Image (spheres, helix red, strand yellow):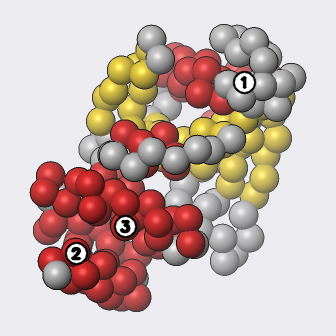
Amino acid sequence: MKTTGPGQSTLLLLDAVDILNHLKIPYAVVGAIAAAFHGLVRASQDADVVISLPSGDLPELEKEMHRAGFLVELSKGDVDDPVTAVLMLADAYENRVDLLLGIRGMEAGALSRALEAAFMGGHIRIIGAEDFIAMKIFAGGPKDMDDVRGVLEVSREKLDLPLLKKLTRRYGAGEARTLASLLSKLRR
């Protein structure tokens, strides 16, 4: 593992990504790292990654992460939870990477639209801005909405608005109305 102390979840992320790539598991980094990539820098204690994994492959992924030295814990979401399950990866220094196993409403193409980026001496795949915004509107928490407003302000000229609107509608009519309201406020 690359970590040598606390506060190094981004280094732990690189270790996790190496394993995901080795196992050919499609993924995209989301959360604070994706927000920073899309122009809104904010602090976070962990790194978040959404993955596409058939449920039958989960035991093998858990074994691989254990073998690599990760502390591994699986948390399954309930019926109302937008995230099916989270595979929490940690090290002895309490650095953490959360692997999100599916997000309800997320379009299958989101991972194929992820962008390759150089990151701390390695390469990672980061969720595209349109998918990031739609996903954050769906999550709907105060920090999520701050992320949405910030990325819209910084990146709105670069966004594919028809794609953004389509992706947001997949999460529901309320989310589509929220996006429309946010976009109208930006035009003022």
Q: How far apart are marks 3 and 1 (CA)?
A: 35 Å
Element assignment for label 3: helix
Q: Earlier in the sequence, mark 2 or mark 3?
A: 3
State if disc 2 and disc 1 touch (CB < 8 Å). Answer: no
Furthest-front residue in this view: 188
> Mark 3 or mark 1: which is in front?
3
Drawn side of residue 18 relative to residue 1, left or right: left
What numbered label is drawn on residue 133?
A: none
User: Is residue 170 visible to us here?
Assistant: yes
Q: How far apart are marks 2 and 3 (CA)?
A: 9 Å
Instruction: Report which residue position mark 2 lands on.
Output: 186
Q: In the image, residue 132 lies at what x, y percent?
A: 38, 56
Reply above or below: 28 against 116. Answer: below
What numbered label is drawn on residue 149?
A: 3
User: Is residue 23 visible to us here?
Assistant: no
Corner quadrant of residue 70? top right
What numbered label is drawn on residue 65?
A: 1
Element assignment for label 1: helix
Q: Distance between the residues labelled 1 and 2?
A: 43 Å
Reply above or below: 54 against 65. Answer: below
